[in-house]
């Protein structure tokens, strides 16, 4: 049975077609907002979450660095050195310092060296347990940033995106 049309009082216009368009636009906005919230929870806009960090592994250890971060925000880069009887060196290139300034290192490095255009931070290693080093960083400028990071001779290219 078809729906009975509604009679509006005299002088009132029927704006149902416009109202249906507004309702459709509202539902699209709700879906977009929900997707943005989910992306935030996963770290797509920096500062926590699965998408905001990247980990690179090598035989000498692992580097956990910010993949997505914010401009002028504090950030951490964590280096885990595998057990070894020898000192280990964490290398970064000059592009790293264009993206981040090093505010502090825990524990402090034994020495700093320059080799093949790379800055190396020398750390004592433990023969039995992994050593965890935290670089406290401050982001320098927004944009897509490329840099080289690595432990001992295993240096590779990485990217970070700094949101404005």
Image (cartoon, rainbow, N blue to C red):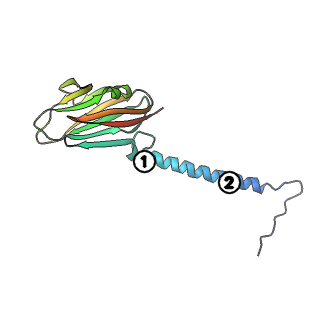
Q: Quadrant of residue 9?
A: bottom right
The residue at the far bottom in this view is 1
- From the top left corner, tell me how far across and down residue 72 is, in percent: 42, 28
> Which residue in the structure is indicated by mark 1?
42
Q: At 19% across and 29% down in the image, what residue appears? A: 122
Question: What crowding class fits label 1: few (fewer than 14 Cα within 10 Å), some (14-19), or many (20 or more)?
Answer: some
How many numbered marks, from 0 up?
A: 2
Q: What separation in Å lies between label 2 and label 1 (alpha carbons)? A: 29 Å
Q: Is residue 99 left or right of residue 88?
A: right
**25 or 148: nearer the eye?**
148
Q: Is residue 68 left or right of residue 77?
A: right
First-in-chain label (2 vs 1):
2
Q: In which quarter of the image is residue 106?
A: top left
Q: Is residue 55 above or below residue 147?
A: below
- From the top left corner, tell me how far across and down residue 36 is, in percent: 51, 47
> Which residue in the structure is indicated by mark 2?
23
**4 or 111: nearer the eye?**
111
- State whether residue 108 appears in this view: no
The residue at the far front in this view is 116
Q: Is residue 164 left or right of residue 11?
A: left
| Quarter that holds the N terminus | bottom right
Q: At 31% across and 30% down in the image, what residue appears? A: 136
- State whether residue 23 appears in this view: yes
Question: What crowding class fits label 2: few (fewer than 14 Cα within 10 Å), some (14-19), or many (20 or more)?
Answer: few
- From the top left corner, tell me how far across and down residue 38 is, in percent: 48, 49
**125 or 88: nearer the eye?**
88
Q: In this view, does 127 lie above or below 122?
A: below
Q: What element carries label 1?
A: loop
Q: In which quarter of the image is residue 140?
A: top left
Q: At 43% across and 27% down in the image, what residue appears? A: 141
Label of residue 28 in the image: none
């Amino acid at each position: 049975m078809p729906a009975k049309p509604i009679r509006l009082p005299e002088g009132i216009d029927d704006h149902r077609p416009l109202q249906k368009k507004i309702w459709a636009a509202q539902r699209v906005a709700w879906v977009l907002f929900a997707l943005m919230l989910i992306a935030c929870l996963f770290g797509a806009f920096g500062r926590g979450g699965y998408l905001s960090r990247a980990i690179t592994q090598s035989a000498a250890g692992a580097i956990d660095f910010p993949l997505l971060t914010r401009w002028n925000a504090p950030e951490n880069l964590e280096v885990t050195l595998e057990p070894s009887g020898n000192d280990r060196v964490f290398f970064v290139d000059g592009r790293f310092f264009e993206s981040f300034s090093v505010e502090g290192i825990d524990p402090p490095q034994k020495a700093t060296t320059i080799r093949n255009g790379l800055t190396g931070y020398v750390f004592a290693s433990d023969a039995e347990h992994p050593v965890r080093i935290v670089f406290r960083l401050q982001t320098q400028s927004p944009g897509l940033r490329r840099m080289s990071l690595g432990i001992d001779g295993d240096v590779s290219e990485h990217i970070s995106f700094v949101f404005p």
